[in-house]
Amino acid sequence: MISTPVKLTPNAIAELRRLMSVPEFDATQRLRIGVKGGGCSGLSYVLGFDKPEADDEMHEIEGIPVVMKNAHGIYLFGMEVDYSDGLNARGFVFNNPNASSSCGCGSSFAV
């Protein structure tokens, strides 16, 4: 394992651990962080639990197993994933220093 290009804030770690602690959680899955084409700004973030694939990089952040595609590192290096539990916005928030622009929803960006 190499150090991960992505950082998880304490709030994100707490929420991920909560999700992983539910009885229905499939412990064979790992947290996948990545990007995919689409969204209003060109690329969208991927964040969810998934089974590892042969071409994944394996990481661990504060005991949370993380998988990423090697090619996604250039888009995600230095990114911070936070979790907001406010009244107006609840969910994971992506703070990406590589994004040249992003959309209003915060889940789509351009480089």
Image (tube, grey):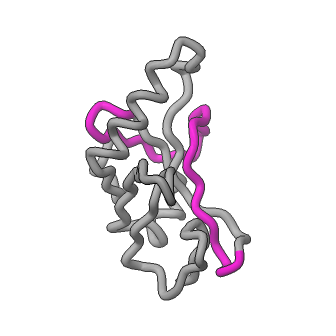
**At 66% from the left edge and 63% from the top edge, which residue is drawn?**
36
**At 49% from the left edge and 39% from the top edge, which residue is drawn?**
31
Instruction: Indicate the position of residue 58 as horizontal and vertical percent values.
Output: 42, 41
Furthest toward the bottom, the residue is: 100
Q: Is residue 44 magenta?
A: yes
Along the line of sight, the residue nearer the viewer: 91 or 67: 91
Instruction: Indicate the position of residue 20 as horizontal and vertical percent values.
Output: 46, 25
Instruction: Indicate the position of residue 38 as horizontal and vertical percent values.
Output: 73, 71
Which of the 4 image quarters holds residue 107? Answer: bottom right
Furthest toward the front, the residue is: 87
> Please, what is the dominant secondary structure of the magenta stretch?
strand
Along the line of sight, the residue nearer the viewer: 61 or 18: 18
- In this rendering, position of residue 71 left or right of residue 16: right
Furthest toward the top, the residue is: 23
Q: Which residues are magenta?
A: 40-64
Instruction: Indicate the position of residue 25 as horizontal and vertical percent values.
Output: 56, 20
Which of the 4 image quarters holds residue 63? Answer: top left
- In this rendering, position of residue 9 left or right of residue 22: left
Q: How many marks?
A: 0
- Up-down relation of residue 64 to residue 6 (above or below): above
- Up-down relation of residue 9 to residue 20 (above or below): below
- Up-down relation of residue 65 to residue 46 (above or below): above
**At 42% from the left edge and 79% from the top edge, which residue is drawn?**
98
Quarter that holds the N terminus: top left
